[in-house]
Amino acid sequence: MVNIAILGSTGSIGINTLEVIRKFPGKFRVIALSGNSNSALLERQAREFRPLFVCVGQAAGVRRLKASSFGKKVKIFTERAGLEAMVAEKKIDKVVIAISGSAALFPLLKAIECKKEIALANKESLVMAGSAIMAMARKNKVKIIPVDSEQSAIWQCLEGEDTVNLRNIYLTASGGPFRETGINKLKAISVRRVLRHPKWRMGRKISVDSATMMNKGLELLEAMFLFGVSSEKIKILIHPEAIVHSMVEFIDGVILAQLSATDMRIPIQYALSYPARLANYDAGSRVDFCRLEGLHFQKPDFMKFPCLKLAYLAASELGTLPAVLSAANEVSVNEFLRGGLKFISIYTVIERVIARHRNIGNPDLEDILHADSWARQEAHNIINKLKYT
Ligand code: NAD
Ligand code: MG
């Protein structure tokens, strides 16, 4: 029985993780849950899974949890410090990091410091501080098992291989909701339209990232840090069917690919059960090759999705630039979701913040945190200027 903590259990990945756990009674025990603002859902989840520890983002949520019937049997934590304290609890074996955005960084670092096994869905933390995270994981001999479907695919294809023999990684992308939309139409696109992804149902931030294709840019950086591979070796391929979740090519010309149904519960399940594989019997979890109308691949359109160019720039320069890219993106996406920024201006804001940044090579965590808050402030200033011009 593996004792699991799910940070961000009220989000899309968190809910899917609980679905996987429900399917395998006796294999996993939910020992800790956390959510930010949706304390009603967190309470329902805690009522069903009976964890020992719960962390909620806001004080009102703490009152709600304490007042409920099981409140006295659970240790309740709150805010960032509480989340880090909860992660350190001895009884936790494995931590699923399903928080969105940079808020995942400190709980992730704490979990690594406490030598917990990590199932990592969050990508912003790696983009921001990938070198520091991977160095800390190596020092503490902690395994970071990727949950993101592309990284899970690459990780499975590289199992038992030496990355010295790697020629290329093909990072696949469904192309997002605007793969076939004309470039001119992207100017006046609504939040509702952006949130309607053709292949994946996900949280709001990653849905916007998929629409701008910044999601693939973040994944490019995520892969570089996870697998220690330079950006020249990572090729993004549009693959609309989203069945091949990524591929690796070796120096002898052999290519290994990981294929499975388009369902996040599959990589989540493997990250929970690794190194074992657990049987999936529902038809939806299988690929029926005879029903597929083909598997297609094409190059991404960098003109239509210029955020990809920014990500490749950050990937070639590294230093504090990936942190700046991710912070400026996070601020712009939140502002777009609030209705204060046009879809196409997400790129403009990030591009201007990057242009003003003085990159610092081989940054330590302090340099990264400084660059992160500088980029957020800069992004807010640019957004304000855009509003009044
Ligand atoms: P989501 O918005 O649906 O859920 C986010 C979760 O994080 C919620 O539980 C929320 O309460 C919590 N949270 C948000 N801000 C917080 C804060 N400041 N402090 C503490 N908790 C906070 O997001 P999601 O789609 O589940 O994505 C989570 C992460 O996984 C993201 O980094 C995303 O890029 C990555 N990811 C998601 C998918 C997917 O299919 N949804 C796939 C691959 C990777
Ligand atoms: Mg992905």
Image: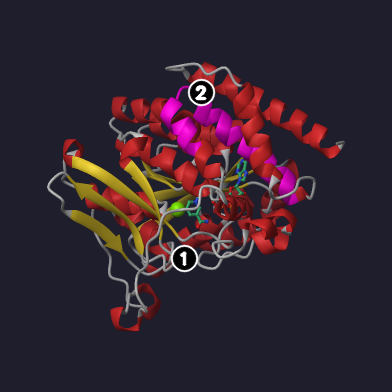
Q: CA distance from mark 2 to mark 1?
A: 37 Å
Residue beneath the point at 59% across and 61% down = 178
Estimate the x, y position of residue 15 in percent, counting from the top left.
53, 60
The tag earlier along the polypeptide, 2 or 1, is 1
Q: Is residue 268 magenta?
A: no
Q: Is residue 85 visible?
A: no
Out of 372 and 242, give the one closest to the viewer: 242
**Location of the C terminus (image quadrant):** top right
Q: Secondary structure at mark 1?
A: helix
Question: Which label is found at residue 19?
Answer: 1
Residue extending furthest left?
Answer: 252
Estimate the x, y position of residue 375 in percent, counting from the top left.
64, 27
Residue beneath the point at 68% across and 54% down = 38
Residue beneath the point at 46% across and 59% down = 17
Indicate whether 334 appears above or below 382. Answer: below
Residue beneath the point at 67% across and 51% down = 65
Estimate the x, y position of residue 115 in percent, counting from the top left.
35, 33
Q: Secondary structure at mark 2?
A: loop
Residue annotated with mark 2: 320
The magenta segment:
311-337
- Amino acid type shown at disc 1: Glu
The quarter of the picture where residue 379 lies is: top right
The quarter of the picture where residue 114 lies is: top left
Principal SS element in the magenta part? helix
- Amino acid type shown at disc 2: Thr
Out of 142 and 245, give the one closest to the viewer: 245
Q: Is residue 58 visible?
A: yes
Which callout, 2 or 1, points to the residue nearer the camera? Answer: 2
Indicate whether 65 appears above or below 265. Answer: above
Q: Is residue 331 magenta?
A: yes
**Location of the N terminus (image quadrant):** bottom left
